[in-house]
Amino acid sequence: MKKRSLLFTGLFLIFLFVLYMQPIWFPQEPAEDETSNQLPRTPPATNLNYETIETEGFAHWIGKDLDEFEQDYGQPEESMASGFSFTINCYLIDDELLEVSTEDKVIKSIKYLGEENDAIKPFQFGMTMDELSKIAMIYPNFTIDYQDETIDLELEEDDMNYRPLIAFDNGTFAILFFEQTQGESQLYAVDYLDSETLLKLAPYTVADDQGPRYEQEKDSDWEEIQRFKRQQTSNLLQLLRKRNEQPTFSLDSKLQMTSEKTLGTFINDKEDILTTERLQELQRFEEEEPGTFTLNDSEMTDLLDDPSVSGHFEMPVYDPSFSVLSWYSTPRLNERLLASNEASLAVAFSKENVLILWKELEYQAEESESN
């Protein structure tokens, strides 16, 4: 028994000795750090980098000299300085819109609303968003290089549905305007423009509130410019109603005087209409923030103080036709622009501020009351 105990103790001591010495006799290679062998990972991109499509249609003319364009399209019916460094050239085409904006005779943008599909290749008037998606990807974000800066544009849901942005491989862009319809929305107008014009018009959200701005030109004849812009805005609004088989607006001199007086009242007495917070918001747009400022329904009601009149105020409006096309592609404003009721119209401008007023015709109001 004693021998067995000694044998067990000896074997146990040998086992402990071997176990203790094993790391020394058979050293293991240090395990490789798996993370050191993995390729460095970059965080997933939050935005898809937009891709361009082949340059076609009016996109070829962006950056070209106006004289070359006029060899094909003739002289403009009217040309007028905008007061903001560019000139607006209007071409006479029945029931269509063709406007070319230039700086120093160089084409900066071309707006076209018409029937000639060859001019807007690869797009077609009347095409749906589903048909557009077969030609080009619709991107929510664009990063644009401008004078040693990169500026990020962000398209909201309504932008992607009704005002998508397409980039061409010659460095130009197109904003496609889709009309509001009960069924699928359809393409009705296109604005081709260079990157600088796109950034200055700022139709989309600009990240970090960065971007170039239009500056008022000194010694501009604002009375003449504003007369031109009133007519330009009215003509396009009438054209849109005609194309949608709605009665054209009546022009009311009394309502016109009201619009001009009301716009002047707002510009001079903003603090009577806006809260402190909204006044500060307006001041940011006036000074540096890209984008547009509009009055909401309650503010417009306070400003007009007349239930028979409705209106829309917006600033800044540098290019009236561009703004009208944008309004027509905005659901709330589209309803007003194309309301079936007969109404009178007035347009007032004060530099980059615009006020549009609508008033239902009196006989229409009387008819509705009798019912």
Image: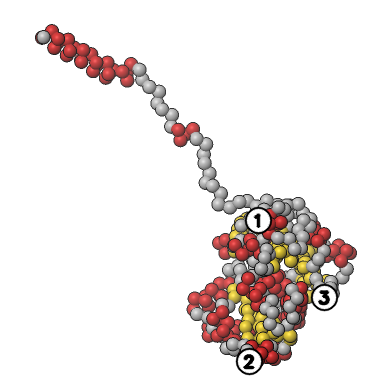
Residue 65: percent from the left, percent from the top? 82, 62
Q: Quadrant of the C terminus?
A: bottom right
Q: Kindly identify which residue carries mark 2.
A: 370
Which is more N-terminal, label 2 or label 1?
Answer: 1
Where is residue 233 drawn, in percent x and y? 73, 77
Q: Give the side of residue 194 with respect to residue 212, left or right.
A: right
Which three-letter amino acid code belongs to the residue tagged 3?
A: Glu
Q: Residue furthest front?
A: 371
Q: Earlier in the sequence, mark 2 or mark 3?
A: 3
In terms of sequence position, does the residue under pointer 1 or pointer 3 come before the other? Answer: 3
Q: Dot 3: few (<14), some (14–19), or many (≥20) neighbours within 10 Å? A: few
> In the image, what residue occupies the spot 33% across and 16% down?
25
Residue 354 in view: no
**How far apart are the two marked residues, 1 and 3, measured between alpha carbons?**
35 Å
- Which element carries disc 2, helix, strand or loop? helix
**Residue sitting at x 76%, y 52%:** 54
Give the tally of numbered discs.
3
Q: How is the image coloured?
A: secondary structure
Q: Looking at the image, which residue is at 35% across and 17% down?
A: 26
Please name the residue that numbered disc 3 is placed on: 78
Q: Residues within 10 Å of mark 1 (few under 14, many from 20)?
A: some
The quadrant of the rendering that contains the N terminus is: top left
The residue carrying mark 1 is 138
Q: Hey, what amino acid is under mark 2?
A: Ser
Residues at circles 1 and 3 in contact by the CB criterion of under 8 Å:
no
Q: What secondary structure is found at the residue carrying circle 3? A: strand
3D distance between C-alphas at marks 2 and 3: 46 Å
- Relative height, residue 105 to residue 78 (above, below): above
- Disc 2 to disc 3: CB gap under 8 Å: no
Coordinates of residue 64 in the picture (x, y in percent): 81, 60
Quarter location, residue 218: bottom right
Q: Image check: 178 left or right of 275?
A: right
